[in-house]
Image: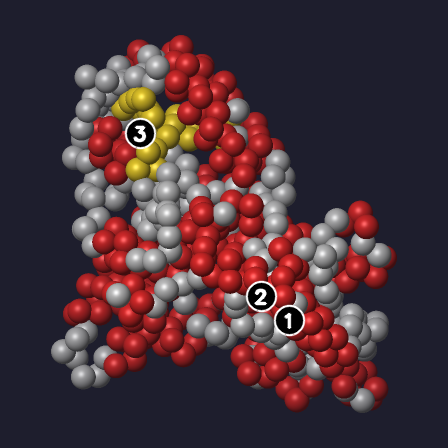
Amino acid sequence: MPRSVVWFKRDLRVADHAPLVEAAGRGPVVGLYVHEPEVLASPEWSPGHLAFIEDCLGELRRRLASLGSVLLVRHGAMPETLDRLHDQWRFEEIWSHEETGLAITYARDRRVAAWCRRRDVLWNQRPQHGVVRPLASRDGWAGRWRRRMSPPPLPVPKSIEGPTTDAIDLLAADDARSIEIRDAGSNPMVEAQRGGEHRATGVLESFLHDRGEDYQRAMSTPVEGWTACSRLSPHLAYGSLSIRTVHHATRHRIDSLREDPAAGRWRRSLASYEKRLRWHCHFMQKLEDEPEIEFRNFNRAFDDLREEDRSRWSDEDRGRFDAWVGGRTGYPLVDACMRCLDRTGWINFRMRAMLVSFAAYHLWLHWKPVAEHLATRFLDFEAGIHYSQCQMQSGVTGINTVRIYSPIKQAIDQDPEGRFIRRWVPELADVPDEHIARPEGMPPLTQHMSGCVIGDTYPAPVVDHETAYRTAKERIFDARGTSLAKREASRVYRKHGSRSRRTERR
């Protein structure tokens, strides 16, 4: 019977885990998670991510121990880590899920594949999402997604044969070396969600049975969306819950409500949520099909639209970026969202789109540094979704509708009483409701009475909304109108565009 290593990456669970199930059916198994220096040094990394991962690893270690095996947590580059482990415990196979990640994780996978060939170790990879590898055409992709999600989630193995007691003692001695990873920096996300499979299941249950009834209506507002949204995204990002498990639980809940005439809001909300599970994989598929979008525009006609190289930015560009990062733009809803992200690692989707739109259009900043900063603030950072969305909201795909969000209108529509704004921008706590979206419009006396003096206790707007909006709209539509942009848009759609069900059935 072959000895196997189950390499955990962004799949930190024991339920619905094909590599674990298959390895457990073949012989002795140890689990492995590696804190990789390259990942920890990437511009997308945050200590907040580490805190969530450590929650997951703590539970995963306990679950594997209860099944009869162990989880090893190491720190180091993968080939060297595998060398050390192979010397300690001669394994013949590695099992893992496929990963659609950053360029550094793709390069690491290639090094692992080369290591396996040198050592005559078989590396078995299994799909985890609806992402198809390799994909020749987007035609029929939605049907493939449904077929991937259709089988029931895999049960947890009843037991797993682990290494002998003597071997465990030898292997565990190396785990102490991973303690140095705790010095990766302080975690600003002091109000972030906690990780782990048990917590993930609880969040799923509370959404499907308690919190999700108003999802369709409330998901756009940062006030009600805080509880009405599923809040499952960090668990899906790090795999403490599989998307297939969520899909089946959602489908089961919808079916259970089918005969209830009073459950209309529930059915509509969960049907809306169910669609977004497919969108999750749809955007990840874009990065799988074209890894270059981590660095380059989808549509190459926009390559010179904004300056990416921060060393070449003007002082004005740097000032605008710093104001956006620090939540000091003078636009209350933008500032509230940025400060909320610093402490919680989460904000609802519409507010994320607004933040990128504001940076791209009002501040005219390149999506790459904007995306890198937000990656460090999104607890649920998922590379495929993140870079696809940041480019889409910046208008450089050429195939998506250009949406230039007004931060003033969004504040009026989504937080009319300023509940969210006042929570995260305390300088505005006593500003009257009628001025909360645009406090610079307060008369001087009102400013002093509210304790919010524009330019003193709260900044004036970093740019004029009307001027910035008009200028950005002219620039982006001029760029979209070129023949190169149109040719590129056709290419981008053929490779990445969503296909309707009607088209797929043909």
Q: What amino acid is at disc 3?
A: Asn
Q: CA distance from mark 2 to mark 1?
A: 7 Å
91 above or below 33? above
Q: Is residue 209 left or right of residue 320?
A: left
Mark 2 vs 3, N-terminal side: 3
Is residue 31 at least partly visible in the picture? no
- Residue at horizontal 53%, vertical 24%? 76
Q: Which residue is mark 1?
A: 481
124 above or below 285? above
- Residue at horizontal 37%, vertical 64%? 499
> In the rendered picture of this protein, how many numbered marks are placed on residues?
3
Q: Secondary structure at mark 3?
A: strand
Front residue of 340/117: it is 117
Residue 329 rendering spot, x and y as whole percentages: 73, 68
Residue count near mark 3 (Cα–Cα under 10 Å), binned few <14, some 14–19, many ≥20: some
Q: Secondary structure at mark 1?
A: loop
Instruction: Give the image's coloring scheme.
Output: secondary structure
Q: Secondary structure at mark 2?
A: helix
Q: Is residue 356 left or right of residue 275?
A: right
**Label for residue 294?**
none
Q: What amino acid is at disc 1?
A: Gly
Front residue of 367/219: it is 367
**Label for residue 486?**
2
Mark 2 vs 1, N-terminal side: 1
Front residue of 215/320: it is 320
Mark 1 vs 3, N-terminal side: 3
- Residue at horizontal 28%, vertical 54%? 144
Q: Which residue is mark 3?
A: 124
The answer to the question of whether label 2 and label 1 lie on touching residues, with beta carbons closer than 8 A, is: yes
